Amino acid sequence: MELGRLEYLQALVTEFQVTDSTGNKRRCSLALSLSSVSSHTRLFFLAEAKEQVLANLANFAYDPSNYEYLRQLQVLDLFLDMLTEDNETLVEFAMGGLCNLCLDKTNKEYILEASGVEPIINCLSSSNEETVVSAVTTLMFLTTPRSRAQTTGLPVVECMLRFSLSANTRLSNLASIFLQDYCSPPQVEEARNLSRHTAVGIPLPKD
Amino acid sequence: QVYTINLESRYLLIQGVPALGVMKELVEQFALYGAIEEYHALDEYPAEEFTEVYLIKFKKLQCARVAKKKMDERSFFGNLLHVCYAPEFETVQETREKLQDRRKYIAKATNQRGCFVLKKVEGPKKTASKNSEHDCPWSTAESQVASNWDPSCFTSSPGVSHNTVYPSGNQNQSLLTSPHYDNNCAEISGYFGQNTSLTPSVHPGGHTPPASLMQQRMVPVSNGIDRFMPRTTHLQERKRKREEGNKFSLIGASEDYTEVVIGPQLPEIPKVDMDDESLNTSATLIRNKLKEVADSVSTTSVEKPESSSAKPIVKQRRRI
């Protein structure tokens, strides 16, 4: 298995790309006869396949020994791109993948350079719990002296304040850590004052 | 299902335990995987008839991970257990520690404790011992040109020891998985790999099976690192020799990656020789496809307004 690891990952990425094209799959892990399946169903299968592939890649991203391959295959870009998809599952998996690999210095730099912080901040408004939780953690991990202004900007801090009051323990724990460890007291204070007066900032997840 | 650090926990929830007063046996089973800090039944938790739900808290996350893997869907006194993580039971401090441990693990695994500058190898520091001084070829990802190190980001951190083996000097390759980068890839601008090395003793369990033996490294030759040959295993030695031989003899199609994509906004795709015809063919196919896509992207730059308006040296994010 080890020798085939890169090949496997390559295949996954290619699979993903081919899946993404206009439905004209040349290679398909699900044996579909295009003629017999309606386009709706076909699209559904394609979406499923995409999700599966993305989940696999995101899980691979947990293991540092894969980072080299993943970078080579530009999977980081893939994850970042998926963050703006309509499909919630794709966003969830992509966010998870980013969360898994963003602690590594190179990956971190890459994501920051590729202006990845903004789409991640947007994920804080997702209605999907996993997405939000991954986004909070990712922002923590991506905070560096240079990126801090963005990752701990006012809207973000405000958002974290609200999260810290959530009934969801996982979320409130993470938000608390964010506020305590990554924000300065004046920042928190400022956000607190602001939220008393206006409703500006990142919209609450709709749940 | 995607596993992230947030999902995992030292706390495990065990459902489906038959209500036969078998708590002791249950805990004993789980204790095989590591020290248990706490355990108790969760009476308020919804459970099927005649079953109970337990919470077990391990001392270490890795133990919980292994226990979950082994005990999930395992039969226990006639019932199928369902084991899952229960991060919602963590305290803030426990979550904090969990995240910190993950940070440390990544830093060790990718050998980036403190930030490193690429520096010349300091003589034969040896690899038999696992505490070698290593250099970490670093540049901020593919977006920068080879010579453009970003010093502001790095401080050198001497004397850091890890339980990783670091061959300094020429590129080496993993015994098992990593692709081979031939030395020429150093000249390819902007693409530098990173040292990753795991040793089983440091990181037991978890998601890395035999890959924990893997050593992977890309050292750009052009930075002047001398042909220092650390003491490596015979296998690596042989592989390395073969690699060197191949480099000069241009044997076979697999060597012929002369097509190097040089573009203003795209990274170089490094030559990769995986030492195997079929793998190389796949690699070439993939690479060509990437190139194709990349080419079409760069010609229709209107499609990527955000990246093109950004700093020119930033690699255009390829839309997939």
Image: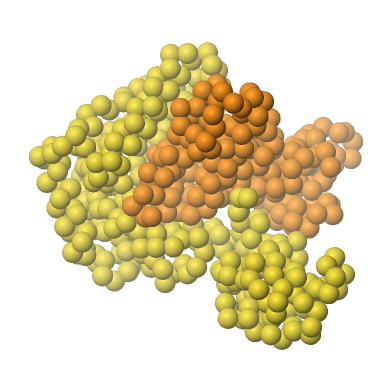
Q: Is residue A56 above or below residue B111?
A: above
Nearer to us in this view, B249 or B114: B249
Nearer to us in this view, B25 or B132: B25
- The picture places residue A202, in percent across and down from the top left corner, at 77, 35
Is A6 positioned to the left or the right of B71 in the image? left
What residue sits 61% from the left and 46% below the top? A96
Q: Is residue A162 above or below residue A25?
A: below
What residue sits 48% from the left and 15% below the top? B301
Looking at the image, the residue that sits furthest to the left is B249
Specify whether residue B157 is in view: no
Nearer to us in this view, A154 or A82: A82
- Splitting the image into 4 quarters, where does residue A55 fall? top right
Marker count (numbered): 0
What residue sits 68% from the left and 30% below the top? A86
- Splitting the image into 4 quarters, where does residue B224 fall? top left
Query: What coloring was used for the rendering?
Result: by chain
Q: Colour of chain B?
A: yellow
Is A94 positioned to the left or the right of B169 in the image? right
Is A187 positioned to the left or the right of A23 in the image? right
Q: Is residue B71 above or below residue B208?
A: below
Quadrant placement of the N terminus of chain A: bottom left
Chain letter for the part of the structure drawn in orange: A
Quadrant placement of the C terminus of chain A: top right
- The picture places residue A119, in percent across and down from the top left corner, at 64, 33
What residue sits 57% from the left and 77% below the top? B33
Nearer to us in this view, A148 or B88: B88
- Splitting the image into 4 quarters, where does residue A149 fall? top right
Specify whether residue A158 is in view: yes
- The picture places residue B37, in percent across and down from the top left corner, at 67, 79
- The picture places residue B215, in percent across and down from the top left corner, at 33, 57
Looking at the image, the residue that sits furthest to the right is A197
Looking at the image, the residue that sits furthest to the front is A36
